[in-house]
Amino acid sequence: AAEKVTPEMINFMATHGRGLICAPLTENRCKDLELNMMVNNNTDPMETAFTVSVDLRGNGVTTGISASDRAKTVKALIDNETRPFELARPGHIFPLVAKEGGVLRRTGHTEAAIDFARLAGLEPAGVIVEI
């Protein structure tokens, strides 16, 4: 769950997962943050809905690549006070737009992360690593 992320968790994902660190979000949250799709014509076989990557601006974030910077960016993505202008684009966190209806609509890890967070009573957002 995104709200539970720590720099240590991000470091573990980067060190052991060695892939893109992504933040599954609801469609509404992506709209609120004005997160545009990465491409107009998604040809990914799984149709993973990547938006443009982001970093949090300010708040102690420097290059955006450190585990601490990425954890702060993930936390900002779920903070209702965060406004679109507070996110630099491109960045080092890759938001993913989850389909409404969760895994019953699309059997992807994007939707699974949202579904698990909801089932746990947490903010409907996740942090995952593509491997």
Image (cartoon, rainbow, N blue to C red):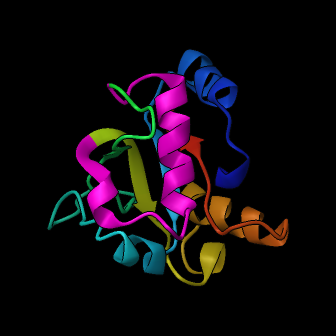
Image vertical order of residue 4 relative to residue 102, above or below: above
Image vertical order of residue 62 relative to residue 6, above or below: above
Q: Position of residue 66 (x, y in %)?
A: 46, 22
Judge from the rendering whether residue 4 lies leftward or rightward of residue 55; answer left or right. right
Image vertical order of residue 26 relative to residue 87, above or below: below
Question: What residue is rendered at 75% in x and 71% in y?
Answer: 118
Image vertical order of residue 102 relative to residue 89, above or below: below
Question: What residue is rendered at 22% in x and 44% in y?
Answer: 90
Q: Could you say which is closer to the camera, residue 96 or residue 103?
A: 96
Judge from the rendering whether residue 22 lies leftward or rightward of residue 85; answer left or right. right
74 within the magenta span: yes
106 within the magenta span: no
Q: Give the range drawn in magenta.
A: 63-90
Choose top left, top right, bottom left or bottom right for residue 38.
bottom left
Furthest-right residue in this view: 120
Question: What residue is rendered at 53% in x and 40% in y?
Answer: 72
Judge from the rendering whether residue 87 lies leftward or rightward of residue 80; answer left or right. left
**Res. 51 in view:** no
Q: Position of residue 1 (x, y in %)?
A: 70, 53
Q: Could you say which is closer to the camera, residue 101 or residue 59?
A: 59
Q: Where is residue 5 in the image (x, y as percent from the top left)?
A: 67, 41
Q: Could you say which is closer to the camera, residue 128 or residue 45?
A: 128
Furthest-left residue in this view: 40
**Res. 109 in view:** yes
Q: Position of residue 123 (x, y in %)?
A: 69, 67
Judge from the rendering whether residue 27 lies leftward or rightward of residue 110; answer left or right. left
Question: What residue is rendered at 65% in x and 79% in y?
Answer: 104
Total marks in image: 0
